[in-house]
Amino acid sequence: MNRDDLRLLQSFHEYPSVSILMPTQTGYANRDIARIHLKDLVREVETRLAKELTDREAAPVLGRLTALVDGLDLDHLGEGLAVFANADYAKAFTLLFTVAEQVAIDPTFETRVLVRALNQSQRYWVLALSEKSTRLFEGLDDRLLEVRRAGFPLVDEEPGGDVKGPGAEGLDRATLMDEFHRHFFRQVDSAFARIAQHDKQPLIVAGVVKYLSLFRDVTRHANWIASTLEGNYDHAGAPELAKETQPLVKGIFEAKQAAALRTLEAAVDANAYVSGSEECWRMAREGRGRLLLVEDSFQFPARETADGGIELAADAAAPGVIDDAVDEIIEQTLQMRGEVTFVPDGALRLHGGIALVLRY
């Protein structure tokens, strides 16, 4: 799941919109357990809708929900599963993070827990290059989940060095194979763009030295590449790759934090920033945020005021209170094409835990 998925989910406003969140565990034995339990939750949806709607009114959403669940491939479970369905849309997402079990039937989909998990985690991509099967992984903290859409995993189906194509006369086998691989890696790059074009995160590219070089020759995402991992990972699973990439991930995000703090320091000198909850809320709403910095553990409940600002609230569960206004500031900054960086607790002690570098 990425930010494009979230934006689409948040765009729906129609009743009934069904959200099912369910914790899962990896493994083939757990696959069958998950399917049985998921169908139990679907029956709960059917029972609840039967009390509110006629059979004719409930049929469109139940039809989509049932078809989606029946067709789910549960061979590659993560730590959670999210299923969403209304009369016009149905999609399921395997999650890298666990979720509390929940069945919600509302005019909108239940996305808050997903927003929070995505916002407060280290997210990145890992692309494992191979002529046999190039795979893409979504990274979240120390976990990887293989992406299985947009053609991934991609297999190089070029004819190989024994087949001469147009313009290949006079080329030796090694040169010809390099051209075949470049063509394949262009396809890989295009498939990656379809998935990640609106969800820019650091990219780690893994593979043998030659493939890393050939991919750099053709990629349109060279400025996304934060690090490379040399070696043959054709047979490495997600846990092994995650272990190998962790030192790189740690370095990437420490460097990102340090750069963000330097940017804030320069903005302070230029008086091009605001800090504190209320000011960051207002500037983010106005679209003026270029870079938002938030301490890892910083959160606060708040109530929106009549003039569009916020005031801190003592009880997060009280009616009309946003249980964590930091999520709202983050989402608003991202919607306006700003960037967000979490920094260690205490790094923003002079700014009340949150600061926003302004565009103007």
Image (cartoon, helix red, strand yellow):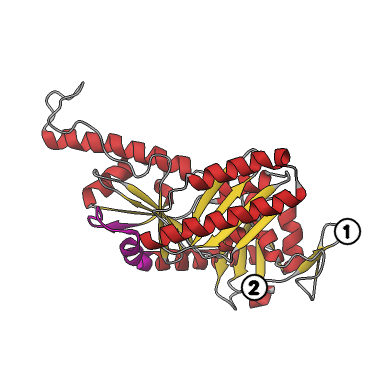
Question: Circle 1 sits on which residue?
Answer: 306
Q: Residue at x 54, y 54 (%)?
A: 39
Give, as a single range, the part of the protein colored magenta.
228-248
Give the vertical position of 172 relative to 114 (above or below).
above
Three-letter code, disc 2: Phe
Q: Residue at x 64, y 77 (%)?
A: 349
The residue lying furthest to the top in this view is 166
Query: Is disc 1 surrounded by few (<14), some (14 to 19) or many (20+) residues within 10 Å?
Result: few
Horizontal side of 238 relative to 79 (left or right) equals left
Give the number of the disc on residue 193: none
Residue 158 rendering spot, x and y as whole percentages? 23, 32
Three-letter code, disc 1: Ala
Spatial distance from mark 1 to mark 2, Cα to Cα?
25 Å
**In contact (CB < 8 Å): disc 1 and disc 2:** no
Question: Circle 2 sits on which residue?
Answer: 298
Horizontal side of 202 relative to 154 (left or right) equals right
Query: Is disc 2 surrounded by few (<14), some (14 to 19) or many (20+) residues within 10 Å?
Result: some
Q: Nearer the viewer, residue 273 or 200?
A: 200
- Based on the displayed image, in which of its 4 quarters is residue 262 positioned? bottom right
Horizontal side of 78 relative to 281 (left or right) equals left
Q: Residue at x 23, y 52 (%)?
A: 208
Identify the element where label 2 is drawn. loop
Among numbered discs 1 and 2, the one appearing first in the sequence: 2
